[in-house]
Image (cartoon, rainbow, N blue to C red):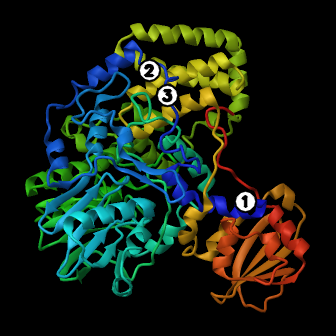
Amino acid sequence: MSRSTNAILVPLLGAALALSGCSDDSRSFIGSENSEHSAAAPTTRDANKKVLDQRPFENRKDFENARRGLIAQAPDLVISQEGGGEVWNMPAYDFVDSEGKSAPESVNPSLWRQAALNNIHGLFEVTDGLYQIRGYDLSNMSIIEGDTGWILVDPLTSKETASEAFLFAREHLGEKPVKAIVFTHSHLDHFGGVQGVLQHLTDEERANLRIIAPEGFEDEATSENIIAGPAMTRRAMYMYGKQLGRDVRGHVGTGLGKAPAFGTFGFEAPTDLVRETGTEITVDGVPMEFQVVSGSEAPAEFTFYLPESNAFCGAELVSRNMHNLYTLRGAKVRDARIWSAYIDEARTRFAEADVYFASHHWPLWGQANIQDFLIKQRDTYKFIHDQSVRLMNQGATPREIAETLKLPEALNQDFHNQGYYGTVSHNAKAVYQNYMGWFTANPAQLNPLPESESARRYVEMMGGEEQVVEKARSEFESASDMDVTEGQKTYRWLAELLNQVVFANPDNKDAKALLANVYDQLGYQAESGPWRDFYLTGAYELRNGAPEVGIKPAMMKDILLHTPVSLFFDSMAVRLNAEDADGENVTIKITFTDLGESYLLTLQNSVLHNRVVSEDTPADATLAITRPLFVDVLIGEAGLKELLFSDDIRFEGSKLDLISFFGMLDKPQGRFNIVTP
């Protein structure tokens, strides 16, 4: 693939890869063997045992709900791509015991319990005429029976998993026409598998199919992460434990589900957009009432209510865990105050609901149970918001707030709002960031040295690398004899201390090895799936180095064909190498012959601008091409240089200017170092 092509392509893949965190390596789902991860230390064992006293683990109601209504289950649920390589592998998680009671020393018992619940998979009847397929992907696909056919809700992440789930439902529920598909929100794990369903529909079904989505869905679904895709992709590898084995010292689940499915991602444009709360639509005889909650968990999202079934679909406004106000892979901060208000609105608007189901996890039955769930979810986000702001206004820093803030007992006994995905700690920091940004007002943080330079000076002042590592080793060994609280703080401090040594000298093998052992312990103690995966991936990369990530561009072709072309050029602007472009002035016009649109790219002052122009606008070089062919260039199925000398495009002006221009664009690989400089 040419440098110019990849400079456009890599960020466009961010939306998919930031979710999946996977590569073109056929082994990527299973990950590596993790025998090299160290054993749980005594302090870690004690810390995890202590968790068992903090909540009512004897309460088995979640397991009853997660198994309720099971119709059928595929015992060996492994889904592969046509070209080879696994997309989904539920048996890989068989090491988690079915009741979630036998947590190993290397896994927080609360996270282990959540992992066991998320292992429960199959086709379930939620209530009359409402079914769910769970455990075929990170998310759920729901099926609503209409008068003559089905309404599908959130057709999973990938074509492969959605196809398998859909055929499994047909096998056990009978074959019915699909009348509508509902996308509850704009994240890939809720629409990316749509083509896996559409491939099984008749021409008549497709011609009459309604696709219902919230206003803004198309723009948000195709544009999310495009600008910062390479960075988000790399960090997602940490968040979802891409390189970790599925075992007791590796990845056990994300909390929100098992892991993202990595396959072929698709898109289909909506036919019906829901613009405001209170919108009522009847689909195949089924009345649906919508609540727009855009700006909560997703920038374009709705929930809906089925009055004939008294069933409330919470989409991802609420889940059976605390969600992220800030996603560790990197994303814009979400507003906890607005999120909480939406939950309260849902609670009152759909107060008659006897059934709750959603885009993740298992359902809930009974008005009182649903109201209690919604109230506590509402109050969890509101508590984190209000108390973080209160402490912020008293002058507390983000780290001080995160260390201080604890959920009140009334909110800390229920498992459904625990930090399996988001946490009080990083959500509190997100509230601070939402209001105040990165700066705490301490002048020392106004213009600090880069990390490596600062680390070198710290280590030198502390007596040198050897002395620091020796002291750290002594403290690490002493942590085994400390009480749980002091031992946990010691590991956190050692992570900070040894990170200084590694950044001062990334070739210091002793420091890296010891820091990896520290990260192991922090990972084993984490209740949050992403925290665990971050720590353990950090340990893995300290021992093995950063990955050589490959990508499979064709997996995004369908989404790219629906992406506004202006976004292609916005992504190019942030890849422009300012040094290479210094002093260069050039205009490039690209005309999409099938769209009747022309864009003028102007390079001046080491800045790239783009704007829509008329087809006769002059430029130094003009390229006339169809969008599908342009996408083929992006994904490497057609070469730009070869096309310039072919009859498939029209070209005017200087070929040299065009090739030189694309040569100024960076080619980010998304495999930069994280735990080393």
Mark 1 residue type: Arg
How far is disc 2 from disc 3 in space, using C-alphas? Answer: 25 Å
Indicate which disc residue 489 carries. 2
**In this view, 475 is above or below 68:** above
Looking at numbered disc 2 in the image, what kind of residue is underneath it? Lys
In the rendered image, is residue 511 in sight?
A: yes
- Identify the residue position indicated by label 1 in the image: 575
Name the residue rendered at 70%, 53% in the picture: 668
- Of marks 2 and 1, which one's residue comes earlier in the chain? 2
Check the picture and name the quadrant holding the C terminus: top right
Q: Nearer the viewer, residue 430 or 620?
A: 620
* Mark 3 crowdedness (10 Å alpha carbons): few <14, some 14-19, many ≥20: some
Q: Position of residue 170 (x, y in %)?
A: 26, 67
| Residue picked out by circle 3 | 34
Q: Mark 1 or mark 3, which is nearer the start of the sequence?
A: 3
Establish if 374 lies above or below 40.
below
Q: CA distance from mark 2 to mark 1?
A: 41 Å
